[in-house]
Image (cartoon, rainbow, N blue to C red):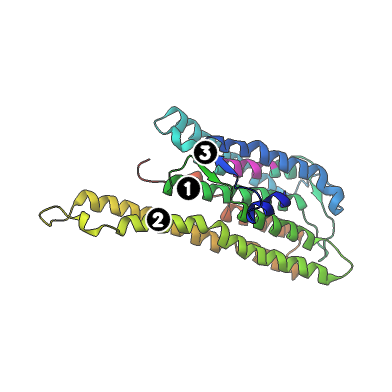
Amino acid sequence: MFAVLLSLVFGWLPPILIAHRHIWLIYPCTQLYLHLAHAGLGPLVGATASPPLEADLYSKQMFALFSCLLLQALTICIFCVAGPKPELIPVLHPPTCIYSIALSYYVYKSYGTPIVVSLDWTGTSFHPLHLVMWSASTSVQCILWQQIYHRQCMTLKSFPLPAKSILFAQGMLWTGLLGQLEFCNVLVNWAFNAACFALLYALLFSCTRPLRLAEEHYHRLATVNVPARTKPDGAPDPDREQHDAALRRIALHFRCARLYVFASWHGFPIVWALGVSGVIDGEMREMLYAICDVLAKFLPVSTYLSMLDVRY
């Protein structure tokens, strides 16, 4: 996987184009990735299967939450198919897929036998599958923003796979996983964690670039060709002013989404720092990470629908 992503980033392979009508393939791909990781990650990092604790109520609450979010997203998809807006379906697949990824993780954690590393380099337990879930959901989120930009601003039937953003996401989370393991020298852990932090900011700037380009696109549409905003007699054209106001609102939606991602994603390093410093234990860290998941990545489908063009 890393070899393919590096080849795409450096141009050794032609860009992989994803047709909007084929975006539904992310469902089986991400679920296969998550299940294979659950089966093979334990022996790799020294994790053991552990039955879920009865006291682990927050995992069951997260399971209920993401079940409701997934049901909501599927309901919206059904109404779009049966209603006048079937063209919205490709845009709804990525956020729905993110909910399904999170739900699969909390099924493992609440009702299965999740793999747990009993002691990491700080002496607390952690769930390596959580990092795998992040790598899958973050990659889908990068695909979603790339898809929205190319669909709305370039009106193309396909869009290139955001290989650079996905490479940063995978690199960030796998270095973060290695940084949690116990090595002979603690400097190795700090090196992996430093690389994880560097890749986090590289990912933030890379994955939010489509949101910034979309904001600039709609802002440009609302400000160019100023003379056309008046009637031949010089009076303001109310229809054009109303249209420009709608374009400015869409641009504002993209800006708010981009700024929100920058702000909310900083919750993860804050929780990590609290865990390393010993302020919180392993279970509290997992609970705070789950809250960060909800705030940072798993936004309602309506958030993405609000960023679509007024013609829809």
Q: CA distance from mark 3 to mark 2?
A: 21 Å
Count neighbours of disc 1 (C-alpha within 10 A) and say few if under 14, some if 14 to 19, many if 20 or more: some
Percent position (x, y) of residue 269?
66, 65
The secondary element bearing badge 2 is classed as: helix
Seen from this angle, which residue lies furthest left? 233
Percent position (x, y) of residue 219?
36, 58
From the viewer's perspective, is 294 left or right of 155? right
Disc 2 residue type (three-letter): His
Count neighbours of disc 3 (C-alpha within 10 A) and say few if under 14, some if 14 to 19, many if 20 or more: some
Percent position (x, y) of residue 302?
46, 45
> Is residue 102 highlighted in magenta?
yes
Disc 3 residue type (three-letter): His
> Is residue 196 highlighted in magenta?
no
Q: At 69% across and 59% down in the image, what residue appears? A: 172
The part of the chain drawn in magenta is 96-104
Seen from this angle, which residue lies furthest top? 82
- Mark 1 sits on what residue? 150
- Mark 2 sits on what residue? 217
Q: CA distance from mark 2 to mark 1?
A: 11 Å
Main secondary structure along the magenta-highlighted residues: helix
Q: At 74% across and 45% down in the image, what residue appears? A: 109
Q: At 70% across and 64% down in the image, what residue appears? A: 196
